[in-house]
Image (cartoon, grey):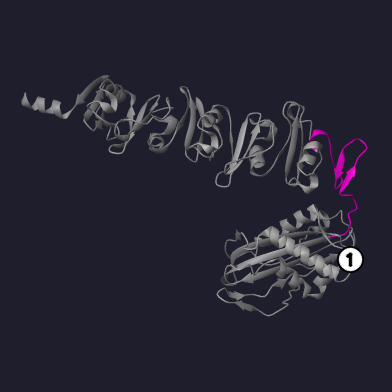
Amino acid sequence: MTRLTPHRPRRASGLGPVLAPVLAALVALPCAGLAVDVATAAPAVAAGPVQVLQPVVPAATQQQQILDGLNRERAAVGAPALTLDPTLQTVAQDWADALGQGDGMRHNPDLGRLLSDFPRWGEIVATADMGNADTRGLENGDLAVDTWMRSDPHRAVLQDRTYTAVGIGLVYTTLFSGGRTVWRSYWVADFGSPRRTPLVAQNPDGSRSYAGVPVKGAILATYTAAGANGGHLGLPVGRELGPLRSGGYGQHFAGGSVYWSAASGAAAVRGGIRDRWAALGWENGWLGYPTGSEFPVRGGLAQRFQGGTVYWSPATGAQALGGAVLAGYGAAGWEDGPLGFPTTTSAPLRGGSFAHFQGGSVYAGPAGTFVVAGPVRAAWAAQGWEAGALGYPASAQFGGLLAGGSGQHFTGGSVYSSPASGTHAVPAAVRDVWAARGWETGVLGYPVSEARRSGDAVVQDFQGGQVSVRGGAAQVRTPSVARTARVR
């Protein structure tokens, strides 16, 4: 592979060495089907882990810088302006991402197949290293265009009059390379002449083809409403699927999918929400078909399905909720309530179901559906969750007790907490004795220890004494009782 160094290394004050951009050898095949042997060198495996970073100059800004720069240099020689093509865009970004995970440059060896709809196509690639993080936006789209223009073969591709479309991809990484840590940008530009297949064509049956793939009916209506090939869904990647469960249909696109059934209507699903739905079995899973588009919620997104709702946030990813757990979450205020976003998907248990959230958990069991949170949840977890002695929650958490205390009942006992006594589980046998003496407002006060075995008895300490239960018989010891016993 030919490597070109168009200008000598520079230094930027306070930033360490800025290494000169290095260009990959160009690939410009005159036509599809013509055998051209292009020598490429595979990227070396990075010596350490590669971390993808957000560039100082945003990716969208760099993309526009490159498009403007390409068209400026093309106008200087009378070449037509380039427009962004979704296919070229996807191919270029995918290859930039692939380069970013290695330690070197090469051209995409699969361009002939990926760009088969373009009679002529070409690719140019550039990379730039810095010895420190780029805090000033020195690695930007203008640098890429300037570097390409300094190389005769790359300039020839850039200004080729037969090209009418371009795709631009880029990635910014840091990795250990050549015995030191570097911060590296890759830029990829893929060019194409006018397509063999029209990008958009109206068909006699009322469907519409995008890059030769037909889209029809309710799926077409939803796709069109989302901006068609110019929207977030991009171009179709396959024909319509179906009939599916309940007579439905679906179709995948570069940026998501659209599914339809008679009961649910048509809706687009994308991103992390689609990934979660797919992991749960698409329309054949318990979520069924989507019943509407995704919608924004505070800090994230949500989308409803026949069997539940999928919530997404940057911190938690996408998680699906259904049934009693979803109802319990709603009763607690959804994502705006103390629970926040779900951190797990609803899952079945023996006799119930559950999901964890940023601010607690929702458990559904024989006694109902309840939120468990804070110190009470931690104490319950320490007892083995619902599989432990306490069993499932049997009440909502309650506060406003004596001395700032709070508590929650479970099918096999209770958990009580106060600032002075800490948080402790009280098994049912001890709890019944304690309740008979006035709970925390009685002489015993709050529990101050966990229940423990002493021989064949269960013993637990309280602020005002001790409860011991043996074989159904209870004994309560308080300081006053002990003194009386000693007097006798």
Q: Quadrant of residue 430?
A: top left
Q: Quadrant of residue 207?
A: top right
Q: Quadrant of residue 419?
A: top left
Residue 265: percent from left, percent from top: 74, 30
Examine the rendered structure and indicate whether residue 432 appears above or below residue 14. above
Instruction: Give whichever of 227, 305 is nearer the camera.
Output: 227
Examine the rendered structure and indicate whether residue 339 appears above or below residue 368. below
**Left or right placement of residue 471 versus residue 227 in this view:** left
**Left or right placement of residue 208 versus residue 177 in this view:** right
Q: Element type at marker 1?
A: loop
Instruction: Give whichever of 160, 381 is nearer the camera.
Output: 160
Residue 349 in view in this figure: no
Q: Residue furthest left?
A: 487
User: Who's the residue at 77% across and 55% down the image?
Assistant: 89
Q: Tell me the residue that label 1 is attached to.
A: 161
**Left or right placement of residue 481 versus residue 459 in this view:** left
Give the quadrant of the C terminus: top left
